Amino acid sequence: MTAVAGTSLDAELGRLFASDPRAMADPDGAWRRLREAHRTYRHEHTILVTRYEDIKALHRDPRGSRRGFFEGSRAEAIRAGLPAEARAAFEAIAAFQGLQVSRTEGATHERLRRIAHRAFTPRRIAAMEGAIVRHRDALLDAVAGEDVVDLQRFAYRLPLLVISDLLGVPDEDEREAVREWGNRIARHFGSRDPALILDAHRAVLEFRAYVERVIARHRADASGASDLVAALMDAEEDERLTEDELAAMFVVLLFAGHETTTNLIGIGMLDLLRHPDQWRRLGADPGLVENAVEELLRRVTPVQWEQRLTVADLQIGDTPVGRGQTVLTMLAGANRDPEVFDRPEELDLGRADARRHLSFGHGPHFCLGAALARLEGRLALAGLAERFPEMALATGAGEVEFQGNAMMRQLKALPVRPRGRR
């Protein structure tokens, strides 16, 4: 492992981890430099890993725990720099998010994953296709004939409507509140800014209070509960799901069910429109859409990295890594590893091995919502390509701005001209 404190690479990484919008707009150069020069790299209090096979191995290794968001070297460094009120907020967020399926291990993880899987059974996913198409078409009908539209609105509205249907959130104001809570919570990931951490804590409290009202409402009138809500609430009995775990389950499904798919659709469409030959290729050959989603998942990497805590000494490549270390597995770097993907910097909707990407993770924590994200991505791209095969950016390709957190960067807006066939 090479540690080169104070290099230009460190400065570049520092801007990315601080969620500088300019750095978030084009992070791939940093991941490429990192991957080419260092198999592992120590940046501040973390070890960064960018090579595909190393990441796959670590994601399978039980010595790499998902508790790395709130334990280990990076979390301790963040705690140490916080004033008392923000540190208390950090601990409260950690306690609640520690109940979520994505932050647990062993038997607890297996139990919560079985319960969460009720949201994503093949039967349930297949049954959602009609509703996704109806939502998609209604959203596209609303912009037909407009000269310039913000496609980012479509990118966030479609997944939000779908997961709201699934979890019984029928009210428009409630849906928008869910989106805003998710954004506020996401902004604090890895942040050392006390203001962001305090605001994320308020968002967690508001989000959790809302979920508890939803649960109480369904308990009072079970006839109004969706099938999934009923299944999750039944888990209190048959899987010994506690009240706190039930609330955490709703939060993670509502949050994870739309944030990552928004990034896939929004940033994916930006990538396609920056490569108009590939956009025209998709319009001319609708059969490419399924593979196009995989290639965009590889290119966009909606969650740029995952975080691991070493709970025992281990080795990454030829580097010994001690217990208690935060390791960031840079999925975005692995998805462009030339040892795995030929011409990795090119967008190729016909790429034969695009599905080998690691955007949904790997191993026991493989993304539960992968099938739903793929379905939504496929239907979104198909609908856009069919209606607007001549779509083009309405602003310069380099003028599109990013916001949020570098781990799950998001577009501020995506102005496009939604042109049909001439």
Image (cartoon, grey):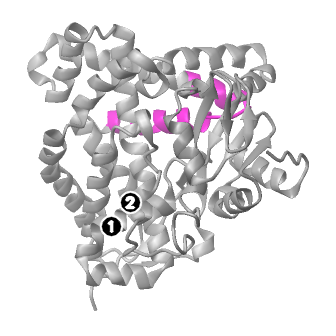
Residue 341 in percent (x, y) is at 51, 67
Label 1: which secondary element: helix
Q: Which residue is mark 1?
A: 291
Side of 89 where 78 appears, left or right: right
Q: Position of residue 51 (x, y in %)?
A: 62, 53
Q: In the image shown, does 411 or 119 lie closer to the viewer?
A: 119
| Camera-nearest residue between 319 and 399 | 319
Q: Residue furthest right?
A: 6
Query: Mark 2: which secondary structure?
Result: helix
Quarter where residue 79 is shown = top right
Q: Residue at x 76, y 50 (%)?
A: 13
Q: Is residue 360 visible?
A: yes
- Residue for point 58% across, 62% down: 337
Give how far apart the Cα atoms at labels 2 and 1 are.
8 Å
| Main secondary structure of the magenta stretch | helix
* 128 falls in the magenta region: no
Question: In the rendering, at what x and y percent does residue 394 appear?
Answer: 49, 77
Magenta range is 173-201
